[in-house]
Amino acid sequence: MAALDESFFRVRFDRLTPTEKKYLRAMAELGPGPHRSGDIAEQLGRTVNSLGPTRANLIAKGMIWSPTHGDTAFTVPLFDAFMKRIMPGEDWRSIASL
């Protein structure tokens, strides 16, 4: 797991903006997924529509995908656990990027 964290997962994480990191961390809080877009928005205290551009950017980067309408899932297995390791606790909620 440490090798994955240091290379495979870290490369993907480093490509993300602070806003995208916060979105993925909110997803991770819900577990491996898939998750309803509304549940992610609720974690962030936002509306689904306001998060549309961030979600679209993450899909374009290949970080998430939509298995069915309104659902969002990680494209990489175990990425939810990585997000919890790299952004532990509740401090991620105070990131002012969203």
Image (cartoon, rainbow, N blue to C red):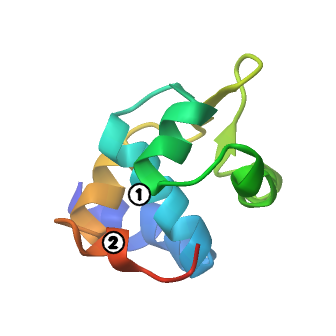
Q: Nearer the viewer, residue 56 or 82?
A: 56
| C-alpha gap between disc 1 and disc 2 | 7 Å
**Residue farthest along the top direction in this orientation:** 68
Q: What residue lies at 25% left-to-right and 75% top-to-bottom? A: 91
User: Residue 25 — which label?
Assistant: 1
Q: Amino acid at mark 1?
A: Arg
- Of labels 1 and 2, earlier in sequence is 1
Q: Nearer the viewer, residue 9 or 69?
A: 69
Residue 15, x across and y down, in percent: 63, 76
Q: Amino acid at mark 2?
A: Trp
Where is the N terminus found, in terms of image quarters?
bottom left
- Quick one: SS at disc 1? helix
Residue linked to disc 2: 92
**In the image, 63: left or right of 8?**
right
- Quick one: SS at disc 2? helix
**Disc 1 + disc 2, Cβ < 8 Å:** yes
